[in-house]
């Protein structure tokens, strides 16, 4: 497997969720590989400053099918993700996949979740199954918990209270850096064989080790050079504080589900898929905390 094969494709790569945690890195990693990138965003004017000039922006909304045609014109590859807020798979995801297949998309790289294959009711698995039923070459990136959640959701507790406040008990998690997920997507999308060698193939993307949150707190303490504790709140304590911080109950419930999975020891599987695709080790939590240290300053 090569990581530096030039793109043998001619059309553009459409990146959904281009302003998001993974999509933003998919866009930059594709641009680094000289792919023709089109970033699909709901508000092109508002997002313009986030992207290099070489990246084309197009208005796109999963919930507004009238935006799909222009976004898909002359596109032959697609990075697909399901925004957490777009819950109706049958109404917004599968018709968009069908539109992509109809308009000439040959390869779809889909951001899924680790363990999706075991849960047919999960929206991610339902999208995977729909992709399997089409003629496009689909590749599933089943990612573990992103390290970036630690600043996007939990930086406030680290910065203002020196604590990591999640109800994960003693369970370990195989945190993956979203930058690595973005790079894996770019490699798959620029395969010389248009992904056909990876057709209906799944990669389980994890970091190099599984860490429990005491170990996570120790990495934070060492890198930030101050004591960070793991608070290990009860579920009601966690839910109430998150709600008071402004998260709606639906989002709090999703977080509780994710941390309960970790608490039960179901989030600790480590694979070498990132290193097999990228030909280098995955980023460590220590590298992540160092790179994002400003987010955690008091
Ligand atoms: N967090 C984790 O640890 C984790 C792990 C594995 C898998 N996942 C999966 O990864 C996916 C989320 O990816 P992410 O974290 O990169 O995304 P994210 O940071 O949550 O960003 C959401 C993206 O979706 C866009 N978006 C929202 N509503 C939209 C709509 N109606 N139409 C088009 N675009 C819309 C947003 O664009 P705007 O700029 O327009 O708002 C934004 O770019 C989910 O399916 C999640 O289950 C997450």
Image (tube, rainbow, N blue to C red):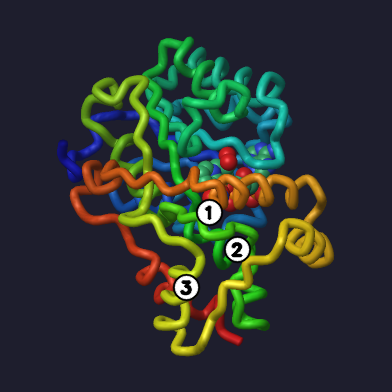
Q: Where residue 2 appears, x then y in whole percent?
A: 16, 40
Whether the residue carrying mark 2 lies under 8 Å from ligand 1 is answered with: yes
Q: Residues within 10 Å of mark 3 (few under 14, many from 20)?
A: few
User: Left or right of 241: which side holds 32?
Assistant: left
Q: Answer with mark 2 or mark 1, whichever residue precedes in sequence.
A: 1
Asked whether 154 or 50 is in front, the reply is 154
Q: Residue at x 61, y 28 (%)?
A: 123
Q: Answer with mark 3 or mark 1, whichever residue precedes in sequence.
A: 1
Q: Given contact means CB atoms under 8 Å apart, are the residues at marks 3 and 2 in contact?
A: no
Task: Compute the Cα span from label 3 to label 2.
Answer: 11 Å
Task: Compute the Cα span from label 3 to label 1.
Answer: 13 Å
Give the number of the mark in front: 2 or 1: 2
Asked whether 30 or 168 is in front, the reply is 168
Whether the residue carrying mark 1 lies under 8 Å from ligand 1 is answered with: yes
Q: Residue at x 34, y 47 (%)?
A: 270
**Residue marked by disc 3:** 292
Q: Residue at x 31, y 35 (%)?
A: 188
Image quarter where the N terminus lies is top left
Q: Where residue 289 appears, x then y in whole percent?
A: 44, 72
Asked whether 214 or 136 is in front, the reply is 214
Judging from the image, what secondary structure is the residue with disc 3 in? loop
Q: Residue at x 57, y 21 (%)?
A: 120
Residue 198 location, quadrant? top left
Q: Given contact means CB atoms under 8 Å apart, are the residues at marks 2 and 1 in contact?
A: yes
**Residue marked by disc 2:** 152
**Residue marked by disc 1:** 21
Judging from the image, what secondary structure is the residue with disc 1 in? loop
């Amino acid at each position: 497997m090569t990581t530096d094969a030039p793109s043998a494709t001619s059309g553009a790569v459409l990146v959904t969720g281009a302003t998001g945690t993974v999509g933003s890195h998919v866009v930059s990693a594709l641009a680094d590989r000289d792919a023709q990138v089109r970033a699909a965003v709901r508000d092109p004017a508002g997002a313009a400053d986030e992207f290099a000039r070489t990246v084309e922006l197009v208005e796109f909304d999963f919930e507004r099918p009238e935006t799909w045609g222009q976004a898909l014109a002359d596109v032959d590859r697609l990075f697909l993700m399901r925004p957490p807020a777009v819950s109706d798979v049958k109404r917004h995801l599968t018709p968009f996949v069908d539109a992509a297949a109809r308009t000439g998309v040959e390869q779809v790289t889909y951001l899924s979740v680790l363990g999706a294959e075991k849960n047919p009711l999960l929206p991610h698995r339902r999208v995977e199954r729909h992709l399997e039923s089409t003629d496009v070459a689909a590749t599933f990136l089943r990612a573990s918990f992103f390290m970036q959640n630690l600043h996007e959701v939990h930086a406030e507790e680290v910065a203002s209270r020196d604590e990591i406040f999640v109800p994960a008990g003693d369970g370990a998690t195989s945190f993956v850096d979203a930058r690595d997920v973005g790079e894996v997507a770019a490699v798959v999308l620029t395969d010389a064989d248009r992904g056909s060698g990876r057709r209906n193939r799944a990669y389980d993307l994890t970091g190099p080790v599984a860490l429990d949150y005491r170990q996570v707190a120790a990495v934070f303490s060492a890198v930030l050079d101050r004591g960070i504790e793991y608070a290990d709140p009860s579920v009601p304590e966690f839910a109430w504080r998150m709600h008071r911080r402004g998260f709606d109950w639906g989002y709090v419930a999703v977080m509780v589900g994710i941390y309960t999975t970790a608490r039960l020891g179901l989030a600790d599987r480590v694979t070498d898929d990132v290193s097999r695709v990228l030909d280098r080790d995955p980023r460590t939590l220590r590298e992540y905390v160092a790179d994002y240290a400003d987010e955690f300053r008091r």
